[in-house]
Image (cartoon, rainbow, N blue to C red):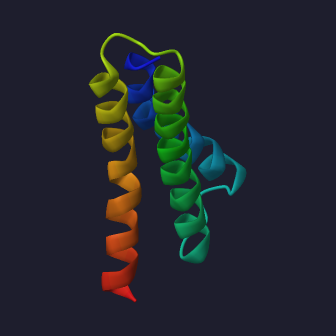
Amino acid sequence: MGACSFLGLPLGAAAYWLADMGGQGAAGVGSSIMAAIGVLAAAGVGMVASIASRERQERWPWLGITGALVSKAPLLLFIVAFIVHH
């Protein structure tokens, strides 16, 4: 499960792509909403996999924690960009 926490990035990108396909590539606020869906999905997957690895008491707990931090990076960048642009 610790290694699965790194899957937040590709799954978040897939969530963004699916939201983009559903929104038909809308610009402006729609694209921000789609990006928010993608980064929240990435952070959520990383966090859940990290918690699961801790619950299972896996051998290398740092792997799940690192994966959660890496998966959370797009969310942090999105928040900073949102603050800077508005």
Residue found 59% across the figure and 54% down from its top: 37
Q: Position of residue 43 (x, y in %)?
A: 48, 46
Left or right of residue 15, residue 85 in this image: left
Residue at 66% in and 55% down: 24
Identify which residue is drawn at 68% across, 57% down: 23
Identity of the residue furthest to the top in this view = 59
> Residue 66 lies in what quarter of the image?
top left
Looking at the rendered structure, the number of numbered marks drawn on it comes to: 0
> Does 24 appear above or below 78?
above
The percent coordinates of residue 33 (x first, y second) are: 59, 65
In the shown orientation, is residue 1 left or right of residue 65?
Answer: right
Q: Measured from the top left, where is residue 17 in percent x and y?
A: 56, 43
- The image shows residue 26 at horizontal and vertical percentages of 61, 65
Q: Nearer the viewer, residue 72 or 50?
A: 50
Residue 79 picture quarter: bottom left
Q: Is residue 60 above or below residue 15?
A: above
- Residue 10, picture quadrant: top left
Residue nearest the observer in this picture, 47 or 74: 47
Q: Residue at 31% across / 40% down in the picture?
A: 70
Closer to us: 81 or 52: 52
In the rendered view, tell whether residue 46 sits above or below residue 60: below
The quadrant in which the C terminus is found is bottom left
Find the residue positioned furthest to the bottom: 86
